Image: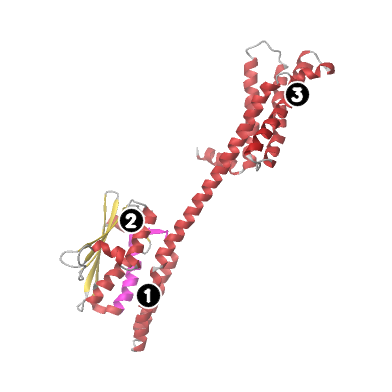
Amino acid sequence: MKQFAAAWQYLLDDRSRFFWLLQGGGWLGYALVHYIGSLMHEMRDIYALIIVLGAYAGFLITVPLRYFYRRIWELNPVILLPVVLTATYVAAASWAVIDNATYWEIYKFGFRPDNWLFYFKNSLAKFYIMASWSGLYFGIKYYQLLQDERQKALMATSMAHQAQLKMLRYQLNPHFLFNTLNAISTLILVKQNDLANQMVSKLSRFLRFSLDNEPIKKIPLVEEIDALMLYLDIERVRFDERLNVVVELSDAAQQALVPSLICQPLIENSIKYAIAKMEAGGEIRIDAAVQGEQLILTVTDNGPGVKGDAQHILDNGGVGLANTRDRLAALYGTDYSFSLTNHDPSGLRIDIHIPYEQAD
C-alpha cells in the first residue's frame, strides 16, 4: 500500500508526467468503452483497428490543444471561453474527419475522395468528447494552481508562525544576559574571579543549550529541567544559600514533551519578585505530573505573592510571563491553560496544562 502511495505521489509531483498518464489512460479508456459497445453489434474483427485508430487520432489531436491552451491561459475569461470553444470544435471536426475516413475507407467501401465532405458527419458528437477533454484539462489545471496557492499560504503561515515563536523566546535572552553579565562584572570587581569563571562557564553551557534547541522544538521535560538547573546554578552564585529549589517529577512527566526553555521565565519571575525581596531567601518548587491526556506543570514560590487577582500580572508585568503564554498559544492554539494564583499561605503559583506528548 505504501509503495502504491509512493508511486502515485511520484506521478503527481511532475505535472508533465501526470498529464501523459491521464492522456494515455483517458484515451485507452475511451477505446475500451467503444470496443465493449461494439460487442453488442455484429461487427467484423477489423473494427477493433478502427477503434484503435480513432482513439489514437483523438490522442494526437488533443496534444497540440494542451500547448495551445498553455499559450492562451492568461487571456481574459470573456475572450478565453470563445477561443477554447472554437479550438475544441476545430479539434472535434478534425477528429470526426479522421474517424469517418478510417471507418468508410478501411471498414466499409475503400478509398472514395469524392465523398470526403461526408466525413464531417458526427462532428457534433466528437465536439462533446473534445469539450469534455478541454473541461478536464482546465479543471485539473485550475485545481493544481489552487493546490499550489494553498501550499504557498500554508508555508507562509508556517514561516510566520516560526518567526513569531523565535521572536517571543529570544526576547527573553537580553534580560537574562543583562542580569548575568552584571553579576559577573560585580564578582570581578570584588576579586571573586573563581566564582565569575564558574558563572561564565555555566552561562556558556546554558546559551549553547538555548542555541541548539529552536523555539518551535519540543524536548523531554527532564532535559528542560537539566537546562533549568544550569540557569539556577548561575542564579545561586548571586543568591548563595538564599535560593532553594525543589523539583518533583513523576516518571511519566519526565518523558513528556514541552517547549524548550518554557520554565526559565517562570523561575526568573519567582526569583525577581519573591527570592530577591526576601532577606532570608525563599523556596521555588517545580512539580510535574500527567493526568489523563494532560501534562500539569506547576511552579510555586513562598514569596510575598500579589494583592488581589494574580492573573493581572500577565497584562501588567514584564515580557517573561506574557511571552510564555503567547508561546503556548502559538504552539497549542486553545488546547492549553496558563494561570496565576496566590499560593497558600504565601507566594505565587503558576499552573500550565498542555497536551501530554511522550518522547520517543
The circle drawn on residue 202 is 1
Q: Which residues are magenta?
A: 215-237
List the residue tagged with mark 2: 256
Q: Where's residue 304, x and y in %?
A: 20, 71
Q: Where's residue 23, x and y in %?
A: 65, 33
Q: Is residue 7 visible?
A: no
Going from N to C along the chain, the mark reached first, 2 or 3, is 3
Q: Amino acid at mark 3?
A: Ile
Outermost residue toward the front?
78
Q: Reply above or below: 114 against 63.
A: above
Check residue 223 for magenta coloring.
Answer: yes
Distance CA(mark 2)–CA(mark 3)? 70 Å
Which callout, 2 or 3, points to the residue nearer the camera? 3
Q: Amino acid at mark 2?
A: Ala
The circle drawn on residue 98 is 3
How many residues crowd mark 3 within 10 Å: few (<14), some (14–19), many (20+)?
some
